[in-house]
């Protein structure tokens, strides 16, 4: 099965002092939310919108693709921003608490550096995965960014999408 993800509206990613992940974006099926804090590695959707889906059967995650296209120009002279996507899961019994699925970080290439025009695209793909998932597990796709160089505090806005392969 192929599970599609698309942000619908642009998401906003931030980096904070030290170039670390600031706020992230959650992407669902034509919808998204920005401003999500993933510091500490966990996400609690209790007071947020729900962009997760539930697995109807057991399966194996085999691949994850991700794409990001800027919707605002950026000046990143002397700075490189790297965008990543990762799956998060809420295990059985499912609840609103999500943790990263180990092995599912997709680092998008073309890192953003220098003058970034509107519509600059970055994408990534990981294949050959054999990550088992159980029925009723909830999955969520999360986009984030890090920075290195002169400007470590940044805001990146763009459309995000992806696809998940489950056998």
Image (cartoon, rainbow, N blue to C red):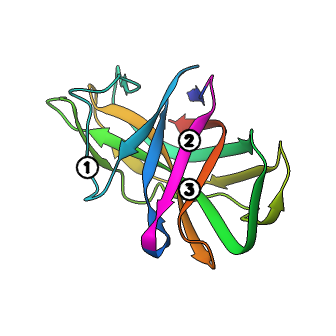
Q: CA distance from mark 1 to mark 3?
A: 16 Å
Q: Residue at x 57, y 46 (%)?
A: 64
- In the picture, the disc for residue 42 is 1
> Where is residue 28 shown, x and y percent of the image?
50, 26
Q: CA distance from mark 1 to mark 2?
A: 19 Å
Confirm whether residue 28 shows in the render: no
Say above or below: 87 vs 54.
below
Labels 1 and 3: the sequence-earlier one: 1
Residue 104 part of the magenta segment = no
Q: Which residues are magenta?
A: 8-17
SS at mark 2 in the image: strand
Q: Residue at x 40, y 35 (%)?
A: 140
Viewer-proximal residue, 142 or 157? 157
Disc 3 target residue: 84
Disc 2 target residue: 12
Labels 3 and 2: the sequence-earlier one: 2
Mark closer to the observer (3, 2): 2
Say above or below: 26 vs 126.
above
- Category of crowding for the residue at label 3, using alpha-carbon neighbours closer than 10 angstroms: few (below 14), some (14–19), many (at least 20): many
SS at mark 1 in the image: loop
Question: Residue 137 appears in which quarter of the rendering?
Answer: top left
Side of 41 where 32 appears, left or right? right
Q: Residue at x 48, y 40 (%)?
A: 25
Is mark 3 in CB contact (under 8 Å) with mark 2?
no
Q: Residue at x 43, y 49 (%)?
A: 23
Labels 1 and 2: the sequence-earlier one: 2
> Where is residue 39 shown, x and y percent of the image?
30, 57
Say above or below: 129 vs 4.
below
> What is the tally of numbered marks visible in this picture?
3
- In the picture, the disc for residue 67 is none
């Amino acid at each position: 099965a192929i599970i599609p993800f698309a942000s619908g509206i642009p998401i906003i990613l931030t980096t904070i002092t030290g170039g670390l992940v600031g706020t992230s974006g959650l992407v669902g099926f034509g919808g998204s939310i920005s401003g999500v804090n993933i510091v500490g590695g966990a996400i609690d959707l209790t007071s947020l919108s729900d962009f997760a889906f539930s697995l109807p059967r057991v399966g194996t995650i085999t691949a994850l693709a991700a794409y990001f296209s800027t919707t605002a120009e950026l000046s990143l002279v002397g700075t490189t921003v790297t965008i990543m996507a990762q799956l998060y899961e809420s295990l059985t019994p499912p609840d609103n608490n999500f943790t990263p699925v180990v092995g599912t970080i997709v680092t998008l290439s073309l890192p953003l550096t220098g003058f970034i025009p509107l519509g600059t695209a970055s994408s990534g793909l990981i294949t050959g995965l054999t990550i088992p998932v159980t029925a009723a597990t909830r999955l969520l796709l999360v986009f984030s960014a890090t920075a290195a160089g002169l400007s470590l505090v940044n805001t990146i806005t763009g459309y995000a999408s992806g696809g998940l392969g489950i056998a």
